[in-house]
Image (cartoon, rainbow, N blue to C red):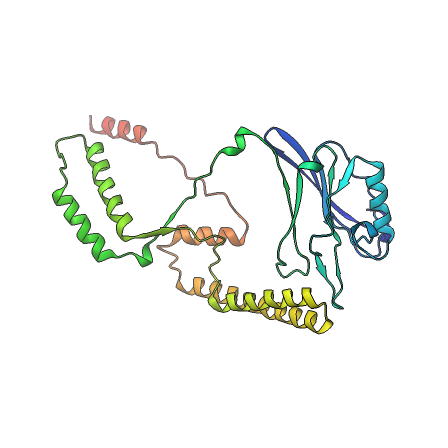
């Protein structure tokens, strides 16, 4: 937007929650730039956040730069509030050990009292992410989403499952004179009871197929070095943390390549057609399933009867 010295990146998101329309502006301002905020439409339920690279004594900088002055003017001339506390940790750690907060959060006055700002651990980007939460009271928000559990067939006790199933089928009072659908349901329920006793179920949060104990240890070491650099502010500690971050990134990249090679070498393109399609679809960012033409059984049966009549 504008000349190179007036450049800034702004993305607008429209979000609806509990019949409320929120406007969310995500902003990035390169260092030493003068931003142009004329594109922002500040009204009700508006949130502005991002990496502003703005200096101001209002958020604990020792100086005020052009971007900081523009943000101060925008807050003073609009119904915006700065959501900030000097008790929160700084979001950025410089190479020289200086800790600053270029990542800001602004909210319109009608929701500023309901808006909370939370700083979480650095995901290896140099910046600690800012999590924004807006407390909206509504009965529709009490709906609980059920977690779908997966069967871990690789760790199943198949001999015990077989013995339990045979015992249940022989001892359960199955009525073979009832309708076949009801009989099928009874047998399926027996199989489920046996499966729950012998096959582990669960769900791994944020499962990543390439993740390993080695990467866990590298990440633990990186996080510990980040905490040390945060506490001491020494240039040597910051450099050690950044070197460890580079080691972790390289190890993750290598683990992804190894996982990809293993998948390609072990896949059976004849029997694993669905698995192959899903994998290739993920590579191409395709989320839709292939459309399958419905089978017209009635027409085929009618045609068969006409042929034999």
Q: Position of residue 64 (x, y in %)?
A: 86, 53
Q: Is residue 60 left or right of residue 140?
A: right
Q: Residue at 46% of width from left, 59% of height from top?
A: 209
Q: Residue at 19% of width from left, 48% of height from top?
A: 165
The quadrant where residue 303 appears: top left
Q: Is residue 149 left or right of residue 298?
A: right
Q: Position of residue 199 (x, y in %)?
A: 30, 52
Q: Is residue 279 above or below residue 182?
A: below
Q: Nearer the viewer, residue 152 or 61?
A: 61
Q: Nearer the viewer, residue 117 or 208?
A: 117
Q: Is residue 199 left or right of residue 210?
A: left
Count of numbered circles on the image: 0
Quadrant for the C terminus in the image: top left
Q: Nearer the viewer, residue 289 or 236?
A: 236
Q: Residue at 42% of width from left, 65% of height from top?
A: 265
The quadrant where residue 276 appears: bottom left
Q: Residue at 19% of width from left, 50% of height from top?
A: 164
Q: Position of residue 197 (x, y in %)?
A: 26, 50
Q: Is residue 92 above or below residue 14?
A: below
Q: Position of residue 97 (x, y in %)?
A: 74, 67
The quadrant where residue 120 appears: bottom right
Q: Is residue 192 left or right of residue 96?
A: left
């Amino acid at each position: 937007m504008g000349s190179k010295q007036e450049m800034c990146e702004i993305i607008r998101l429209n979000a609806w929650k509990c019949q409320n329309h929120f406007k969310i502006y995500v902003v990035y301002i390169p260092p030493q730039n003068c931003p142009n905020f004329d594109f922002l439409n500040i009204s009700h339920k508006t949130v502005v956040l991002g990496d502003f690279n703005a200096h101001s004594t209002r958020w604990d900088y020792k100086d005020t730069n052009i971007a900081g002055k523009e943000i101060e003017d925008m807050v003073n001339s609009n119904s915006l509030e700065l959501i900030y506390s000097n008790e929160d940790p700084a979001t950025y750690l410089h190479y020289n050990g200086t800790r600053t907060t270029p990542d800001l959060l602004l909210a319109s006055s009608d929701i500023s009292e309901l808006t909370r700002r939370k700083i979480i651990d650095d995901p290896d980007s140099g910046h600690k992410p800012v999590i924004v939460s807006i407390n909206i009271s509504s009965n529709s928000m009490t709906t609980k989403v059920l977690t779908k559990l997966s069967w871990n067939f690789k760790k199943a006790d198949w001999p015990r499952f077989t013995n339990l199933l045979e015992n249940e089928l022989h001892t359960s009072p199955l009525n073979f004179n009832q309708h076949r659908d009801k009989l099928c349901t009874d047998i399926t329920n027996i199989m489920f009871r046996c499966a729950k006793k012998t096959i582990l179920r669960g769900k791994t949060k944020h499962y990543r197929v390439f993740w390993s104990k080695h990467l866990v240890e590298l990440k633990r070491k990186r996080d510990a070095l980040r905490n040390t650099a945060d506490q001491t502010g020494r240039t040597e500690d910051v450099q050690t943390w950044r070197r460890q971050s580079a080691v972790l990134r390289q190890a993750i990249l290598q683990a992804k390549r190894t996982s990809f090679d293993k998948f390609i070498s072990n896949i059976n393109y004849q029997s694993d057609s669905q698995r192959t399609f899903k994998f290739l679809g993920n590579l191409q960012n395709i989320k839709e399933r292939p459309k399958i033409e419905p089978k017209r059984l009635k027409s085929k049966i009618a045609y068969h009867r006409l042929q034999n009549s």
